[in-house]
Amino acid sequence: EKGGYKHFMAKEIAEQPGILKDTLDAYVKEGRIALPGAADAALPFADLDRLTLVACGTAHYACHVAKYWFETLARLPVEIDVASEFRYRQPPLPARSMALVVSQSGETADTLAALRYVKEEGVGVGAIVNVEGSTIARESDAVIRTLAGTEIGVASTKAFTGQLMVLALLALRAAEARGTLSAAEIAGHLAALEAMPGLAHQALQLSERITEMSHALSEARDVLFLGRGAMYPLALEGALKLKEISYIHAEGYASGELKHGPIALIDRTVPVIVLAPRDALFEKTVSNMQEVMAREGRVILVTDAEGAAEAGEGVWHLVRMPALPDPIFAPLLYAIPAQLIAYHTAVAKGTDVDQPRNLAKSVTVE
Ligand code: F6R
């Protein structure tokens, strides 16, 4: 049932190129975004002043990435929150707004409570869920399914990238509806998404390289992840993945926040993983990285060939990623090395990768 893999998590990481492709096949027809009919009607993107995205854990980080996409591509203001805060904060929801909740299981208690709050406020709510017929799917006005299949590993991997692909398509659909991008620009972004399954397949080939590196990483007590823009939430996700399965303390930071506190932690014992595709903010991230290296911090740089040529000198380890046609969607691809780093570090430590201590797959109590 593990298909020759040692753990479900390894199998699920490897399934991602196929899932990304299935998602594109399901929701893009003849070069156009084609959501399920009911969902399209329930998502009045052209009329919205604000979109609220609510979820827990990894699904929340997918929302956090998507905030960058909706705001950049569709100029749609997005509010994000974790469901456990949102449900008790009870924020006012503007009339011209709607919410989307995101959940793999469709049973997470806090996310369900957030959905019910939005409905009570008389605002429309859609759900992006992986489990068909789940409570969250049943109670929301519109459902868009992620097509990740059954996820068994407690640490979410393929559901996350499945959520990201659906959210990327929704952001492009919103851009189309709001007229913020031309048809040619949308076609260009769609082509970049269509390239993702192939690129994800290439990224999986890094597994061996990451295995070697992870032996060294497994000795660390604390690890920092840095990213900018849409890679900032991926830094948060990378840190969550590492801590939940390897029990190494890890934190994600926006690169620009480093000098506002966390740089005090840097010495040779705290590896810093920098997630930095060659994009418009690359130089800024590199300068943060150099600040780390000037303090003897050991950097693992995850970047493409161009980024490596420009900034790879003197780093502790380099993870060379395929180049991206459209860096805005980089989190979809860089999720793979983030997952592989967590996985191989946990394997090196000998922890229970698929069933980490204290965690349950679906959190149905608050
Ligand atoms: C982390 C992880 C959790 C879930 C969270 C939400 O790897 O799996 O953080 O993402 O518990 O679960 P769902 O998506 O089922 O609502």
Image: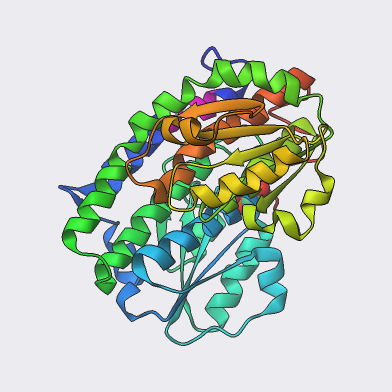
- Residue 58 located within the stretch drawn in magenta: no
- Residue 13 located within the stretch drawn in magenta: yes
Work out whether 196 lies above or below 89. above
Report whether residue 142 is seen. no
Report whether residue 343 is seen. yes
Q: Quadrant of the N terminus?
A: top right
Task: Characterize the magenta stretch by its predominant secondary structure.
Answer: helix
Q: Position of residue 17 (x, y in %)?
A: 40, 31
| Residue lying at the far top of the rendered structure | 4
Counting the numbered discs, the total is 0
Q: Position of residue 66 (x, y in %)?
A: 47, 58
Image quadrant of residue 271? top right
Identify the residue shown where x is 71% and y is 38%.
293
Work out whether 260 lies above or below 300. below
Identify the residue shown where x is 49% and y is 63%.
67
Residue sitting nearer the eye, 354 or 14? 14
Q: Which residues are magenta?
A: 11-16
Q: Is residue 32 left or right of residue 316?
A: left
Q: Is residue 359 left or right of residue 21?
A: right
Identify the residue shown where x is 17% and y is 60%.
183
Image quadrant of residue 87? bottom right
Q: Is residue 345 left or right of residue 173?
A: right
Q: How is the image coloured?
A: rainbow
Q: Position of residue 350 (x, y in %)?
A: 78, 19
Work out whether 16 lies above or below 36. above
Residue sitting nearer the eye, 340 or 309? 309
Identify the residue shown where x is 64% and y is 41%.
238
Residue sitting nearer the eye, 270 or 50? 270
Q: Quadrant of the C terminus?
A: bottom right
Q: Is residue 110 left or right of residue 310?
A: right
